[in-house]
Amino acid sequence: MNNALILLIIIPLITGMVLIIFRKKIVFHRVASAAALLVTSIISLILIYQVKTKGIQSLQLGGWEAPFGISFVVDMFSALLLLTTSLVAFACLGYAFRSIGTEREANYFYPLYLFLITGVYGSFLTGDLFNLFVCFEVMLISSYVLLSLGGTKIQLRESIKYILINVLSSSLFLVGIAYLYAVVGTLNMAHLSARIAEVGQDGVTTTVSLLFIIVFGLKAALFLFYWLPGSYSAPPTAIGAIFAALLTKVGIYALFRTFTLIFYHEPQITHLLLGIMGVATMVLGAFGAIAFSDIKRILTYNVIISVGLIIAGLASYSLIGITGSINYLVHDMIIKALLFLIGGTIISLTGTDKLGEVTGLIRTHPYLGWMFFIAALSVSGIPPLSGFLGKVFITKGTFEAGYYWLGGVGLMTSLMVLYSVMKIFMNAFWGETNLSQEMEKGTTKGVMFPIVLLTMLTVLLGVGAEAMQPYVKIAADDLMNPLHYIHAVLGSNSLQ
Amino acid sequence: METLMAITIGFLFSLGTYLVLTKSLIRIILGTSIIGHGVNLLILTMGGLKTGGPPLLGGEDLSYTDALPQALILTAIVINFAVTALFLVLAYRSYKTLRTDDMEQLRGYEDE
């Protein structure tokens, strides 16, 4: 029992609710939401420490023992993601202070933002499949409103599609839950894992697991990503960045959780399918990233490519592949937020996102340019930045598992990622400066802090990778050994 | 009873799918709502249909009803209701702004 787990849900939720009451006090909104995220960052740091020293932590809500009550569980994998979420959310919030505009601030931007983070925390923490659905919905409903907040034409058009695809995938999620309940008779993840390990994963269970691949694939933009490029480029920069950093990652987390804890007995069917979908995601995403010539579209396709790469590590289902995926997942959350923030800053400076119309920004904004350069190297996995280690481990894992095509495609798409982001760098920052400082539509004043913060994080994560590895190793070990999780949740009940 | 439920659920799903595939936005929203109802019935059926058993474990009766699916459905109904309400408001707003509810005209990107 560890009550710190529930604090991560309560703090942003209650803060958001209080903020709704004080609608007019914008400064209070800013201070309170930043404070809430700082506190949750500290709590997730404490959780990482506790998981390292005392093993997987769990909380049975209301004292109802698992599997009868709802369990909250945090292992090293979710603890690392919780910390990264807190940091990225804090940085994007800092960007929103200066860029989101008073109109949106007065219309409950900050409460919605906190509810979104609540949903993400909840999804990482929960140990119950139905509760995962509820946390998904908390996150999604906030994202629906954030996406349409402001009501411009493109936002409305894209939110309709985004809501429709997510409502349908939520329905399919419930269908999966219903079938699984009929087959196994429980929804607690640890209990599910124990029972399926006991009776074996038969054809029906495997079929249900394929339904979960579709559901989480839709959320994670794994192959079923056709909704993503439009809806992630519609909202303002701060919202787009937090979407790109967090929302697909929650789907990836759910895939990792279900396919390492519950449905891991038939990897030649489920994990192979995940691998094939991963390859298709990487290839199609790379085509998109190369084909388009506007900043936002290129960056959204980069989100898709990285989803495929992370899932490649899961598909290999080897310790080294999973280690790589965890490394890359943490890196990707930071780097996607960073790329979106810098891309959004370029667009707000120049007033256009067509690459041909932006040149020579390095003269007027050298720091922004070099930080974009660092981000571009990091996202394509150049050492010593943070993307390198994850990519090496994922590739090694896929080779060990015999999926040479998977690792090979991963490496090929890395080159295309490099090309696509360098295209932005060379077009936007090199060349003749066609925009004097007086002519600029926006300003970098006040928005540089979050960008610098995230750049420092990606450099630190790359240079200090050695220090992080013990934690990642624990996370990967626990993912590969479902018994650890089961014992932590069910305790002495695990034999029943 | 299970057969009847299966046919009903299948009918609701096919009706919902048909409506989601139409062009008009309001029909699409109704379609998602109908699929939501189909899902709720599915959860109910999957929990096992019994008549006359109280939802108590450990009582005198040998037959008891599982109360969990009903708790799940209650949550799912609330969420479905909230999302449908939001979706309808958004549809109205986008009809006022975009002057159309035809999905054919809302497809693709602006610059294509």
Image: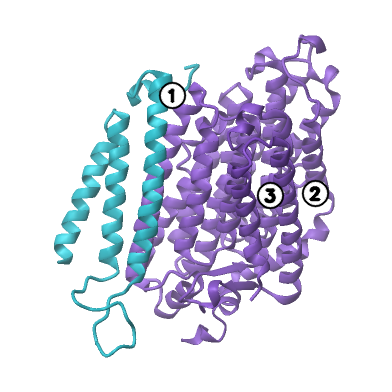
Chain colours: A purple, B cyan
Residue type, mark 2 in image: Gly
Residues marked 2 and 1 touching at CB (< 8 Å):
no
Position in image of residue A195 (x %, y %): 43, 77
Q: Mark 2 or mark 3, which has the lower sequence index? A: 3
Q: Chain of mark 1?
A: B
Question: Does residue A218 show up?
Answer: yes
The residue identified by callout 2 is: A462
Where residue A124 sits, quadrant-wise, is bottom right
Residue type, mark 1 in image: Gly
Q: On screen, A81 above or below A102?
A: below
Residue type, mark 3 in image: Lys
Residue B4 is left or right of residue A242, and the answer is left
The residue identified by callout 3 is: A391
Q: Chain of mark 3?
A: A
Which of these two is toward me, B58 or B32? Answer: B58
Q: Chain of mark 2?
A: A
Residue A395 is left or right of residue A91, and the answer is left
Residue furthest bottom in the image:
B60
Residue A116 is left or right of residue A76, and the answer is left
Position in image of residue A381 (x %, y %): 72, 43
Residue depth check, mark 2 versus mark 3: number of the one nearer the observer:
2
Q: Residue at x 21, y 43 (%)?
A: B15
Q: Residue at x 49, y 59 (%)?
A: A132
Q: Which mark is residue B108?
A: 1
Q: Which mark is residue A247?
A: none
